[in-house]
Amino acid sequence: MARRRAAPLGPDYRESVLWHEGVERAHPAPGRLPTEADVVVVGGGYCGLMAAAELTRRGRHVVVLEAEELGVGGASTRNGGMVIPELKYGPRALTRKYGPLGREMAESVFDACSLVARLVDEHGIACDYQQTGGLLLAHHDAQVAGLRESEREWVDDLGRPAHFVDGDALHEEIGSSEYVAGLVMDDVAGIQPAKYHAGLVRIALDAGVELHDRTAAEVLEPRARGGWRVATTRGVVLTKDVLVATNAYIDGLVPPLKRRVLPVGSFIIATGVLDEDVARAVIPRGRMVFDTRNLLAYWRLSPDRRMVFGGRTSLAPMSVAKARDRLYEEMVRIHPQLDGMPLDFAWGGHVAITFDRMPHFGRVNGVAYATGCNGTGIALATWFGERAAAWIADGEPPPVFAHLKFPKIPMSSLRRAYLPAVGQWFRAMDRAGR
Ligand SMILES: Cc1cc2nc3c(=O)[nH]c(=O)nc-3n(C[C@H](O)[C@H](O)[C@H](O)COP(=O)(O)OP(=O)(O)OC[C@H]3O[C@@H](n4cnc5c(N)ncnc54)[C@H](O)[C@@H]3O)c2cc1C
């Protein structure tokens, strides 16, 4: 077996998140935790912040509890920054499975992306938002028919701009000979995720939200006369309602959610700044790029022209250093132009996988939740937050995903034992083009 090569590291290499560099984080005053609130929101990522801002705008007194330092914990400042209107299944498969609700689900992710664009515009969020378009690449001939079908779905069913590329047109999109075809989707955009998160923090604080970080919710207890007693690491808050916006960072707070959400590691590496001609050679049109594999890779240029390359090469628990070396090999296999280019950053985070690969929204044992972004949640989590606020404050209809049954992850307590085997099975399917 060929020995794995360690990735070359630049002199300033750090095991930390590129996006955190130079972003001023809001430090909410560490004031006393209020004893009462209308709504307690658990989680200070995109979903929790958006929900809190919108609930406050609708006249509610809201307290956000974030277990970690705001802007450091969770996935919202450590993702790939690709704003993608996608679910794991296209509109035709969703309609076959869920009837007219399926189409509503497919359309809702476009609403979610429009919400991100509107927030950026209306609130002047300086997060390097750019509608770059996305490029989905087929790694195997067997995937080409699927891409053609996706093109028809985007253009004919949803009326969205997209086009299939192969041959010379493909090579004008990507400097790699590893792929057989691609689908360009114009609606996809890129952001700097931590700057977008900082923008949502500002919107929430300006609205009057009380943000408390380094404060974990530990126990949710229903009260005899309605409402909740929320015990935290810094005291108790009595509240009328609770929204749990923890996505993959699920702990034992709401046990039925823990049995339904599987946190899986995803890792990202970032090279040093590329010369302009090298950047143009790898992603000539600056698209957000991802491929069709089960153990997918996703990559893009950062606003300061680094290659940012992410993915999962296994489902087994893994150190950042090991994932980094594997991702580097993968990056160089796809883009040999980058061989020898040292890395400046590597980091990881968790994505929330559900058994049906769908997002979920609703109440369990009386607690409201929005979860299950399955690796594509920048737009969805923001939109879930906004919709949750309208639902909780004013009884507006919940997102269509509230109609789905939320299946348990089979044998979830044994996940550490069986996940590596699932990963190997995914890799075998990827080799076979399935
Ligand atoms: C490496 C990686 C790459 C990704 N790339 C993309 C991408 O390119 N495009 C895309 O659309 N999506 C991407 N995602 C997914 C996206 O980042 C998430 O779907 C999104 O950030 C979820 O936002 P959220 O607010 O729901 O949850 P998070 O941002 O994860 O926030 C949840 C928060 O809850 C807090 N918390 C948990 N338990 C408690 C408790 N008991 N008390 C208080 N606080 C608690 C956590 O500390 C955490 O900060 C990626 C994710 C990862 C990890």
Image (cartoon, rainbow, N blue to C red):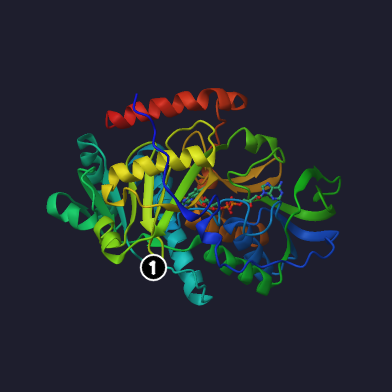
Q: Position of residue 265 (x, y in %)?
A: 52, 40
Q: Position of residue 17 (x, y in %)?
A: 54, 55
Q: Nearer the viewer, residue 304 or 7?
A: 7
Residue name at image x 68 percent, y 70 percent: 205
Q: Nearer the viewer, residue 420 or 134?
A: 420
Residue name at image x 59 percent, y 56 percent: 47
- Quarter of the rendering occupied by the N terminus: top left
In the image, is residue 206 above or below residue 17?
Answer: below
Q: Nearer the viewer, residue 401 or 44?
A: 44
Where, by quadrant of the figure, is residue 388 drawn? bottom right
Q: Position of residue 64 (x, y in %)?
A: 71, 59
Where, by quadrant of the figure, is residue 190 drawn? bottom left
Residue 89 appears anywhere in the view: no
> Badge 1: how crowded within 10 Å, few (<14), some, or many (20+)?
some
Q: Position of residue 215 (x, y in %)?
A: 76, 53
Q: Nearer the viewer, residue 394 or 37?
A: 37
Residue 92 appears anywhere in the view: yes
Is residue 195 toward the left or the right of residue 80 in the image?
Answer: right
Question: Label 1 belongs to which residue?
Answer: 130
Give the residue type that dot 1 points to: Gln
Mark 1: C-beta under 8 Å from nearest atom of ligand 1: no
- Quarter of the rendering occupied by the C terminus: top left
